[in-house]
Amino acid sequence: MTRGDGVILVVDDDDDTREAMEIVLTDEGYRVELASGGHGALAYLRAHAAPSLILLDLMMPEMDGYEFRSRQVGDPAIAHIPVVVATGSGSGHLRESELHGALILHKPLVLEALIAAIERHRIH
């Protein structure tokens, strides 16, 4: 089953989480690329065609999801890419305005909610 040519860029500092997301999303028919953090994601975005969606972990060392989003929306070449933020933080600790309208999903992720979020952005 293939859902199309859209690529999902999974950005997470945890190796196991990245690999699990790759397996799950690939099994669902999506093409997946991986980045181990914000710096890696920006390097990927500079070197490749824009993905259809970024699945972004919020809490990462060196460059967290907030800083990544700030840099992303500040760069016209990549600002348009939709982002789904995955976080283990409670909603009371989120600085939603700094996420610039990204869709927020709370960990542990529910597969149906994740797929619905991806499909909402028409990753076909």
Image (tube, rainbow, N blue to C red):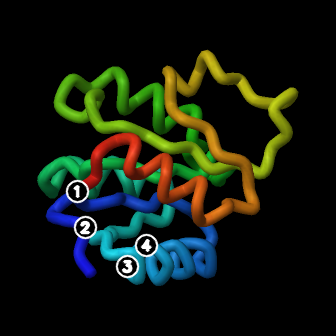
Cβ–Cβ below 8 Å for labels 1 and 4? Answer: no
What is the x, y in percent for residue 13? 59, 64
Q: Residues under labels 2 and 3: Cα distance?
A: 10 Å
Q: Is disc 4 placed on a helix, strand or loop? A: helix
Residue 60's spot in the image, x, y percent?
Answer: 64, 53
Which mark is drawn over residue 88?
Answer: none
Does 8 sit left or right of 59 as displayed?
Answer: left
Q: Residue at x 15, y 57 (%)?
A: 48
**Tag 1 near tag 2, CB within 8 Å:** yes
Residue 19 at what x, y percent from top left? 52, 81
Instruction: Specify which label sits upstream in the sequence, 2 or 3.
Output: 2
- 2 to 124, vertically: above or below: below
Screen quadrant of the N terminus:
bottom left
Q: Amino acid at mark 3?
A: Thr
CB atoms at circles 2 and 4 under 8 Å apart? no
- Res 111 → quadrant: bottom right
Amino acid residing under circle 2:
Arg
Cα separation, mark 1 vs mark 3, equals 13 Å
Q: Along the polypeptide, which appears first: circle 1 or circle 3? A: 3
Whichever of callouts 1 and 2 sits on the residue coming sooner in the sequence is 2
Tell me where residue 81 appears, x and y as whole percent. 29, 37
The amino acid on which the numbered mark 1 sits, given as a three-letter code, is His
Question: Label 2 crowding class (10 Å Cα cut-off): few <14, some 14-19, many 20+?
Answer: some
**Toward which corner of the image does residue 12 lie, by quadrant?**
bottom right
The answer to which quarter of the image holds residue 90 is top right
Disc 2: which residue: 3
Q: Residue at x 74, y 56 (%)?
A: 107
Q: Which mark is residue 26?
A: 3
